[in-house]
Image (tube, grey):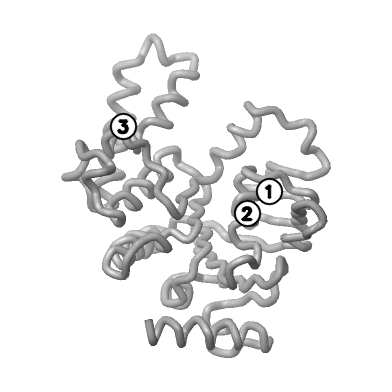
Amino acid sequence: MAILEVRNIVKRFGTAEVLRDISFSLEEGQSLAIIGSSGSGKTTLLRCLNFLEPMDGGSVSVRGEELFSADRYESYNEKSIRRKRLHFGLVFQAFHLFPQYTALKNVVLARELWAKTQPDYKKDKRRILEEINARGLALLEQVGLSDKRDFYPHQLSGGQQQRVAIARALAMGPDILCFDEPTSALDPELTGEVLNVMKSLHERRVTMLVVTHEMGFAREVADHVIFMDDGLIAEQGTPEEIFGSPKSERLRSFLKTVLNYKENG
């Protein structure tokens, strides 16, 4: 059974239909790359999956459980939405770290806040916080930043901040880790260190959904690639199919433009 099933998602902003009948699935342990020109609907799709934008049609299921359905949108309250979002970890373009907290505190904060809502927190507070702290340190080590635990965001490079953001997204143990152009704000050297962390996550069989302009990553690491164009899934397949033998003229044109830009950039 697929870990993620997306069925017939539609999203409109006013009269503009920015997502049109989007359907796909993702197997556990696989990485899915979503590529396409700016404005093709990639980020909007990611926001719908995380319930940051309400869908106008369609549904999203994780592990066979329907999480979101446009038909039942009015029945969702904020508490249920927060619980459903725990299935997804989201890494943004712009890091969004809390500047007043250290790297470690940024990683563990959400887990600490969640723990406080649990019935056994008051009687076992010390043990719970120690476990959360240990988990946070392990995640920082996983992304190569154990020596930066007490650094504040302004003391970290952009690549280091993004790696902290990845550790933070992993802290709640999501089923699916989502990335929205995670390297778009970084220079090439810093881009490499973030992509290396993502490659290591793929090797650990972390289920990932990656909106990206990094064609090298999509080609070398992804198990499946979706090409979006004008709010539609215009083509999808293995990296070999998408990059080696694209079927549509639109995908061939996109790859020619993007890959030539990368070669000349």
- Is the Cβ of the residue at disc 3 closer than 8 Å to that at disc 2? no
Query: Of the residues shown, which amino acid type is indicated by label 3?
Result: Gln
Query: Of the residues shown, which amino acid type is indicated by label 2?
Result: Leu
Determine which residue is flagged by label 3: 100
* Front one among 7 and 21: 21
Q: Residue furthest left?
A: 147
SS state under label 1: strand
SS state under label 2: strand
Question: Residue at point 50% right, 81% down?
Answer: 258
Does residue 209 appear anywhere in the picture? Answer: yes
Q: Residue 83: where, in percent of width, then height?
A: 59, 32
- Is the Cβ of the residue at disc 1 closer than 8 Å to that at disc 3? no
Query: Of the residues shown, which amino acid type is indicated by label 1?
Result: Ser
* Front one among 209 and 95: 95
Q: Left or right: 51 with respect to 161?
A: right
Give whichever of discs 1 and 2 has the lower sequence position: 2
Q: Does residue 118 sit above or below 225 in this rendering?
A: above
Q: Residue 64: where, in percent of width, then height?
A: 68, 47
Determine which residue is flagged by label 1: 61
Q: Residue 9: where, in percent of width, then height?
A: 75, 56
Q: Left or right: 32 with respect to 125?
A: right
Q: Does residue 193 sit above or below 57 in this rendering?
A: below
Spatial CA distance of label 1 from label 2 is: 6 Å
Spatial CA distance of label 3 from label 2 is: 35 Å
Determine which residue is flagged by label 2: 4
Q: Which mark is residue 95?
A: none
Q: Quadrant of residue 139?
A: top left
Give whichever of discs 1 and 3 has the lower sequence position: 1
